[in-house]
């Protein structure tokens, strides 16, 4: 048996700390924060054996990457997942039920309590030590204000989304509203419409949550294991007949959520859309004491034969721990022929978030057996390795230092925390691409921020302490079986980017030298154009920053969807917030603010955040929002204006339910329902628009916009684009995910900038139609149709880092391509076309990126994920 512990993330702004345990039969992960899935791809960590995730806290820092990770694990063929953690874990996972679900996977949750804190399987024995902070008070649930109910809750779909009279082609690639959604979106596994005969609702909150979880991951339905799987269903005869897709799903959800915690009994089917019972944050931190399976040792064949055991079945019995009889009648026991058998090695993961947890942790009796002298008749056990998820204030605390020392000099301590582990570049592929792109224009394509020097020196903090301690490094390994010890052969060393472009200019690779020449030529041409004076563009100093330009799932080169719009004197506005958006902002805007004279920082952009728009419920467009709201709330003062969120209704439900497990400040966010401000409601003086108007007016006052309209587009239920007009005379339109939409063309007329998805290349029209996305050509046609001055393309397939091909000649809109961490002023977008010859060479088949893509195309797991992204 081979077993080892490996540090995946040491803890950076991009990705909180995480650890992977490797055994022959499966892998285990401890914590899965935002960015963990992307880091697995970056470091080529395989998904196929990951079947169990343990969480030290029910906090987004620890669980924020789990929703996306579960979707990916299901896609690569994992059929059964187990999630272990503290109280509220099931609640947090089920709060994502509106966008995280698979009928190809079953998920089990195990919640540890102080009275029940053990777990065991074929590889591990685990004791969960749960610690609460000093003076912990559970409190009561926050009372969310009831949303105003307008007189007419009509469907958000416009009367028509057709292509009639439109420059968007009128053909089968442009479906009209009311066309059927795909079968997986309307099947019983995602929106069963009715009640089950003769079934009583679950009685306890735990049963309700478990039922919702089974509805989300209902592999058991296919195997007839679910007790409700084959029950006859019937429609509620009182429900109105569905008129459109949105109506149908609304009716389904109304039927399925008719049961509430305190309500009358109701007949239920698939619990995915039931209301979650209320809870309050449980801020305990769990530390895990783990022991690997007993090491059976090495079978001594010669000794067995000498004792009279014949080769064959008897050998196998001895290896499995059974005694055997020889032909002479003697009994041979396993210990006589197996050498080196011993108990499995002990290791721990200690989570101590702050000094408030120190006293509870160091006083826990669960650790006494591993520290110094113990009671009579009890042997001291040695912990081979301890991973500490703790920062400077904890590790320098006298009680914690003394507690560490009591484990003895044999124990290897590993410290994983961003105060001791530097803010090094963990997205190496993305960073190297940024370096090459910076040759085009270092202001539009800046180098990502990094700092290879940690904030605190571990050796200084632990000076004089008789412990063996090392700072964690990504892919650092501690061997558990058969031998033990620290191993650094796979460690990822810090990347340092060049500050000049001589390595490109003098590269031994001809294509890079030619790329550098073309980059210089583009700069010269742009300089000549600027010599004639700047082109007058409305909002010329507004900056658009692409934080994520990939589709479906994060990859090494492109993160998932997010764009920041920065308006001088009016703050910032986010268009979608895919997982890892905060980390991307950290790299783009100069890290944390460490001093008053620091020129740039991510803190400034977070403080200035006025609003967030979430286009639709697909997970790749919004899983970064919790971290962003949490950081914004930390900077909030009594004078801070509310943060405004424009999103579909069910997204508000998700954030309210998640807030029951963690206070990340959502009560200070003002929510505007996308359905209420659809563009045609304003024209029709719709009552839903009148209801939303007060919040909208307040947003206008803080952000400088004078008109904001959502646009119902063609992708999935509750999918929206947005049109935003500023009082300074500029207009930005964002498509979200969609097929070419006449609604978007109408609402976006005369846009200064159209940001449109271009998921597929032009030769993949069938895939674009099937997945309800746009090709490059279609995105450009939408830009021309709305007479947009500039059209920026984004949301590219993650197959590998290539750029869309298009002919920019004779186009009535200026076209640009978005890259991760690209910041461009509206007044500079016209220059992006000059970069195309260089970009086509940089991403040509002979490039390093293309060759890397070819290698990835031969990887079985990545093939599956790339297919999912198409």
Image: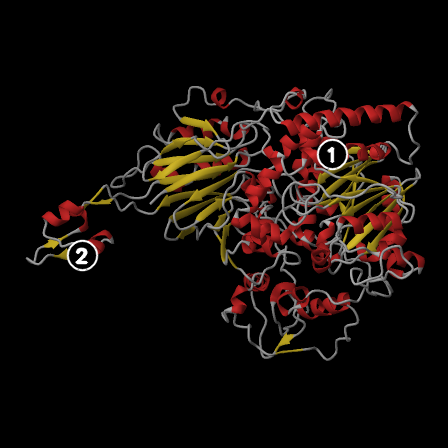
Crowding near pointer 1: few (<14 within 10 Å), some, many (20+)? many
Give the distance between the C-alpha atoms of the residues marked 2 and 1, in whole angstroms. Answer: 67 Å
Residue linked to disc 1: 822
State whether residue 341 is above or below residue 182.
above
Relative placement, left or right, of 656 versus 289 is: right
Q: Residue at x 85, y 62 (%)?
A: 162
Q: Is residue 446 left or right of 318 when viewed as pictured?
A: right
Outermost front residue: 510
Is residue 306 visible to us here? yes
Quarter of the image for residue 582 reads top right
Going from N to C along the chain, the mark reached first, 2 or 1, is 2
Residue 434 position within the rendered picture, expressed as x and y whole percent measured from the top left = 67, 31
223 and 521: which is toward the camera? 521
Badge 2 is on which residue? 314
| Residue 116 higher or lower than 635, as above or below | below
Q: Could you tell me which residue is drawn at 70 percent across and 34 percent down?
A: 841
Q: Quadrant of the N terminus?
A: top left
- Residue 682: image quadrant is bottom right
Where disc 2 sits, the SS reads helix
In this picture, is 518 found above or below 204?
Answer: above
Badge 2, how many Cα within 10 Å: few under 14, some, many 20+?
some
Residue 454, which numbered label?
none
Q: Is residue 670 visible?
A: no
Q: Where does residue 619 sit, x and y in percent of width and height?
A: 66, 51
């Amino acid at each position: 048996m081979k077993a080892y512990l490996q540090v995946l993330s040491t803890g950076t702004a991009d990705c909180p700390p995480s650890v992977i345990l490797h055994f022959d039969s499966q892998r285990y992960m401890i914590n899965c924060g935002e960015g963990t899935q992307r880091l697995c791809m970056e470091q080529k960590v395989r998904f196929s054996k990951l079947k169990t995730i343990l969480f030290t806290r029910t906090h987004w820092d620890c669980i924020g990457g789990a929703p996306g990770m579960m979707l990916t694990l299901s896609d690569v063929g994992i059929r059964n997942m187990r999630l272990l953690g503290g109280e509220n874990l099931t609640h947090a996972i089920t709060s994502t039920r509106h966008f995280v679900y698979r009928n190809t996977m079953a998920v089990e949750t195990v919640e540890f309590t102080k009275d029940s804190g053990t777990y065991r399987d074929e590889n591990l024995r685990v004791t969960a030590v749960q610690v609460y902070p000093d003076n912990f008070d559970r409190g009561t649930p926050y009372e969310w204000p009831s949303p105003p109910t307008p007189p007419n809750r009509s469907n958000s779909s416009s009367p028509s989304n057709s292509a009639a009279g439109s420059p968007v082609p009128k053909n089968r690639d442009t479906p009209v509203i009311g066309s059927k959604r795909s079968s997986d979106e309307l099947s019983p596994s995602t929106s069963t419409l009715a009640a089950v005969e003769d079934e009583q609702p679950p009685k306890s909150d735990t049963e309700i949550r478990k039922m919702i979880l089974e509805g989300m991951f209902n592999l058991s339905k296919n195997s007839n294991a679910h007790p409700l799987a084959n029950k006859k269903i019937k429609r509620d005869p009182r429900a109105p007949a569905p008129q459109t897709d949105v109506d149908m799903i609304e009716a389904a959800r109304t039927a399925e959520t008719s049961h509430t915690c305190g309500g009358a009994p109701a007949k239920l089917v698939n619990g995915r859309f039931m209301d979650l019972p209320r809870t309050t944050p449980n801020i305990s931190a769990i530390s895990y004491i783990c022991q690997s399976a007993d090491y059976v040792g090495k079978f001594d064949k010669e000794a067995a034969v000498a004792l009279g055991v014949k080769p064959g079945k008897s050998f196998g019995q001895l290896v499995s721990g059974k005694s055997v009889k020889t032909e002479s009648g003697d009994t041979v026991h396993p210990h006589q022929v197996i050498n080196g058998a011993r108990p499995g090695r002990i290791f721990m993961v200690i989570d101590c978030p702050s000094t408030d947890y120190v006293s509870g942790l160091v006083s826990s009796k669960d650790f006494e057996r591993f520290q110094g002298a113990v009671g009579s008749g009890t042997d001291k056990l040695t912990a081979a390795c301890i991973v500490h998820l703790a920062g400077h204030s904890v590790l320098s605390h006298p009680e914690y230092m003394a507690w560490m020392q009591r484990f003895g000099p044999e124990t290897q301590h590993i410290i994983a925390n961003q105060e001791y582990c530097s803010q090094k570049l963990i997205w190496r592929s993305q960073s190297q691409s940024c370096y090459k792109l910076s040759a085009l224009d270092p202001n539009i394509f800046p180098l990502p921020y990094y700092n290879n020097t940690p904030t605190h020196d571990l050796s200084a903090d632990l000076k004089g302490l008789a412990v063996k301690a090392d700072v964690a490094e990504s892919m650092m390994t501690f061997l558990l079986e058969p031998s033990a010890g620290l191993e650094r052969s796979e460690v990822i060393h810090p990347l340092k980017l060049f500050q000049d472009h001589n390595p490109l200019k003098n590269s031994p690779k001809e294509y890079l030298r030619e790329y550098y020449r073309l980059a210089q030529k583009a700069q010269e041409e742009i300089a000549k154009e600027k010599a004639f004076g700047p082109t007058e563009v409305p909002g010329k100093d507004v900056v658009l920053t692409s934080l994520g330009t990939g589709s479906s799932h994060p990859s090494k080169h492109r993160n998932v969807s997010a764009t920041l719009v920065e308006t001088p004197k009016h703050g910032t506005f986010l268009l979608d917030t895919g997982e890892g958006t905060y980390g991307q902002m950290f790299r783009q805007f100069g890290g944390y603010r460490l001093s008053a004279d620091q020129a740039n920082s991510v803190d400034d952009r977070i403080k200035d955040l006025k609003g967030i728009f979430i286009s639709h419920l697909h997970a790749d467009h919004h899983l970064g929002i919790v971290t962003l709201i949490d950081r914004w709330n930390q900077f909030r003062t009594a004078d801070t204006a509310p943060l405004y969120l424009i999103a579909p209704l069910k997204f508000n439900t998700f954030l309210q339910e998640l807030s029951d497990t963690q206070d990340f400040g959502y009560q200070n966010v003002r929510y505007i329902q996308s359905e209420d401000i659809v563009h045609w409601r304003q024209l029709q003086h719709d009552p839903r628009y009148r209801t939303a108007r007060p919040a909208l007016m307040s947003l206008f006052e803080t952000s400088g916009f004078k008109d904001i309209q959502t646009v119902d587009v063609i992708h999935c239920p509750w999918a929206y684009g947005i049109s935003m007009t500023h009082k300074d005379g500029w207009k930005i339109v964002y498509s979200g995910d969609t097929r070419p939409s006449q609604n978007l063309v109408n609402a976006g007329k005369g846009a200064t900038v159209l940001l449109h998805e271009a998921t597929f290349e032009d030769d993949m029209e069938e895939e674009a139609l099937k997945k309800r996305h746009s090709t490059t050509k279609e995105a450009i046609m939408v830009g021309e149709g709305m007479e947009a001055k500039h059209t920026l393309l984004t949301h590219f397939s993650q197959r590998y880092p290539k750029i869309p091909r298009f002919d920019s000649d004779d186009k009535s809109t200026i076209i640009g391509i978005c890259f991760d961490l690209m910041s461009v002023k509206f007044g500079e977008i016209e220059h992006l076309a000059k970069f195309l010859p260089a970009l086509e060479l940089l991403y040509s088949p002979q490039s390093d990126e293309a060759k890397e893509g070819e290698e990835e195309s031969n990887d079985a797991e990545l093939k599956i994920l790339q297919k999912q992204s198409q």
